């Protein structure tokens, strides 16, 4: 039985005290001997951490006690060894860089489609109103190469901040369709969905919880390959196991 718990979580929520919060989180995570990365910005929090399950769940419980992070969904997976070499807690301009400051997800999420509904739409090829459905991969090209949904649109992004220009160049691919944007854990596809709606595409959804939540709830139906993750495991299979284990 793997002994190391891995978590991924984010929330877009205004954070006015990011430097002070950074100090608190460093102290808590170090005391619990956790490793990984926590990013803080005025727009929210983004974290990937690993460690013994009791310690990691204690850290999450402390986060949830803060009203800003109460109920923040945490995606879990397991590994045989610690996949992170150190702990990093940073304050950044954005928790996921798009270079588009008008995006304010804390003001309201784009509509989200849950994993089971997304699977049903992919099964039938259309949404519940009969509109054709396309899956839009918002990840970087090298991530897509590890695995993606069958027939997904892939704009071969070098970095997420390329997304606005890619949308301008390829918008015609999405016109008249229901778009389900997806990414690893939800953060990029949420920002992308909001951006697309601001750009005038109304039939846009984010895959709630990203690929990792989809794996957890569906076993990976319609997904081919593995999901790249930014730690030493490199990629997870649809059973949320390190693909190389």
Image (tube, rainbow, N blue to C red):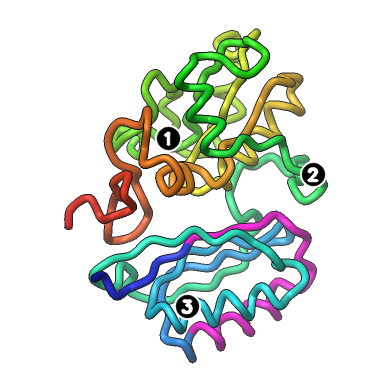
Q: Position of residue 109 (x, y in %)?
A: 74, 42
The residue singled out by tag 2 in the image is 108
Query: Looking at the image, which residue is at 31% across and 49% down?
Result: 239
- Crowdedness near tag 2: few (<14), some (14–19) or many (≥20) residues, C-alpha within 10 Å: few
Q: Nearer the viewer, mark 2 or mark 3?
A: 3
Q: Residue at x 79, y 68 (%)?
A: 16
Front residue (pair 25, 133): 133
In which quadrant will I find the C terminus?
bottom left
User: What is the x, y in percent for residue 173?
Assistant: 55, 11
Disc on res. 158:
1
- What whole-number distance in Å separates the C-alpha atoms at marks 2 and 3? 29 Å
Q: Are marks 2 and 1 in contact (CB under 8 Å)?
A: no
Query: Residue 185: x, y in percent?
Result: 50, 49
User: Residue drawn 41% across and 77% down?
Assistant: 53
Residue 71, horizontal then vertical, whole percent: 68, 64
**Whole-number angstrom distance, CA of label 2 to CA of label 1:** 28 Å
The numbered mark, 2 or 1, whose residue comes first in the sequence reads 2
Q: Which residues are magenta?
A: 8-29
Q: Dot 1: what SS? A: loop
Residue drawn at the location 28% of the way across and 66% of the way down: 79
- Mark number displayed over residue 56: 3
Q: Is residue 134 above or below residue 95?
A: above
């Amino acid at each position: 039985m793997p002994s190391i718990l891995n978590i991924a979580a984010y929330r877009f929520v205004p954070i006015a005290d990011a430097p002070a919060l950074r100090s608190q989180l460093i102290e808590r995570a170090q005391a619990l001997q956790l490793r990984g990365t926590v990013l803080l910005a005025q727009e929210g929090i983004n974290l990937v951490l690993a460690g013994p399950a009791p310690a990691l769940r204690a850290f999450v419980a402390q986060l949830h006690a803060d009203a800003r992070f109460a109920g923040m969904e945490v995606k879990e997976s397991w590994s045989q060894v610690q996949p992170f070499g150190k702990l990093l807690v940073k304050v950044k301009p954005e928790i996921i860089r798009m270079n588009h400051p008008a995006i304010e997800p804390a003001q309201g999420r784009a509509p989200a489609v849950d994993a089971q509904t997304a699977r049903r739409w992919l099964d039938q090829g259309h949404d519940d109103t009969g509109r054709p459905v396309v899956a839009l991969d918002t990840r970087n090209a090298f991530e897509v190469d590890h695995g993606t949904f069958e027939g997904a649109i892939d704009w071969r992004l070098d970095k997420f901040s390329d997304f606005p220009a890619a949308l301008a160049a390829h918008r015609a691919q999405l016109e008249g369709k229901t778009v389900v944007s997806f990414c690893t854990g939800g953060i990029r596809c949420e920002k992308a969905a909001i951006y697309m709606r601001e750009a005038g595409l109304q039939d846009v959804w984010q895959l709630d919880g990203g690929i990792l939540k989809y794996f957890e709830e569906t076993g990976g139906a319609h997904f081919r390959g593995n999901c790249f993750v930014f730690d030493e495991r490199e990629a997870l299979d649809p059973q949320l196991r390190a693909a190389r284990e």
